[in-house]
Amino acid sequence: MAAGLDPCSVLVTGSNRGIGFELVRQLAAKSSRPEWIFATCRDPEGPRAQELKKLTTKHKGVVIVPMDTTDPSSIKAAVARVTEKLKGAGLNLLINNAGIVRRSSLESEMPEDMAEVYQTNVIGPMIVSQAFLPLLRKASQESPQKGMSCSKAAIVNISSEGGSITNVFAWKLGQVVSYRCSKAALNMLTRCQSLGFAEDEILCVALHPGWVQTDMGNTLQQAPLTVDVSVRETLSTLARLTEKASGTLVNWEGEALPW
């Protein structure tokens, strides 16, 4: 965690592997780490969550919370658990990281795949943000800080330059139509959130973490960026964000990307 990023509480969705797991790991490893790091995933007991479980034994304050971001009742239960742990405090930073990709072309794209990807990549972040909004508002209201920051109250939606209508990143490598459409929609959701929550002083930003070496990132071919570097730079960028960045799409190094 870079200097300047000091939220008391952070929640990361999809944190059992890939970028989500590395965000939790790097946040937990810092000397000035958050008091609470809520690591959510669908199946905390499953084989894919074993590394995350190991991490919780090493770091007090890292709490695994079962949550399926596509299931409102699961989200409601997660909010209750987080609220209980926070004992009256708010939630400073929500990172909507959970996402999926399905390989497809324009000709082969299936409506059920499009619906599934949209459900996870757009509707998930929307309903998770709605559910945690009271805790984010509480954090913002009770913070002595002026303006907006990721240490005060923020929603960070992990997006992709693949959803940039201007750039259409890596089109030749893969059309992945459902994924691109979902990230373009997530970008619009972020913009709407930034306008809707401006009075609450909740910073809302879409972030492209780079093309990262994860199970998902390597879908098209070996990705160029390591998870370690992407997350380290991302946390450094989050430390620097102010209200000027709210409602924008930035990359892991903090550079503005076009919609």
Image: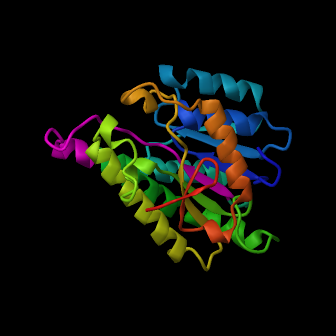
Q: Horizontally, is 171 left or right of 108 in the view?
A: right
Magenta-colored stretch includes residue 108:
yes
Total tally of numbered discs in the picture: 0
Q: Horizontally, is 158 left or right of 259 in the view?
A: right
Residue ID at (41%, 57%):
186
**Taking the image as drawn, is residue 87 in sight?**
no
Report the quarter where the C terminus lies: bottom left
Residue toward you, 68 or 235: 235
Residue toward you, 79 or 169: 169
Residue ID at (68%, 43%):
233
The outermost residue toward the right is 31
Residue ID at (66%, 71%):
243
**Taking the image as drawn, is residue 205 in sight?**
yes
Return the x and y of residue 68 as percentages of the image width and height.
44, 42
**Vertical position of residue 67 compared to residue 259: above or below:** above
Magenta residues: mostly which secondary structure? loop
Question: Which color mode does the image show?
Answer: rainbow
Q: Horizontally, is 9 left or right of 224 in the view?
A: right
The outermost residue toward the left is 107
**Vertical position of residue 212 compared to residue 148: above or below:** above
Q: Horizontally, is 226 left or right of 89 in the view?
A: left
Magenta-colored stretch includes residue 135:
no
The outermost residue toward the bottom is 199
Report the quarter where the N terminus lies: top right
Return the x and y of residue 200 as percentages of the image width and height.
63, 75
Residue toward you, 50 or 24: 24
Q: Which portion, as a residue range, is magenta? A: 91-115
**Vertical position of residue 217 compared to residue 87: above or below:** above
Return the x and y of residue 125 as percentages of the image width and height.
45, 54
Return the x and y of residue 222 as percentages of the image width and height.
45, 25
Residue ID at (83%, 50%):
3
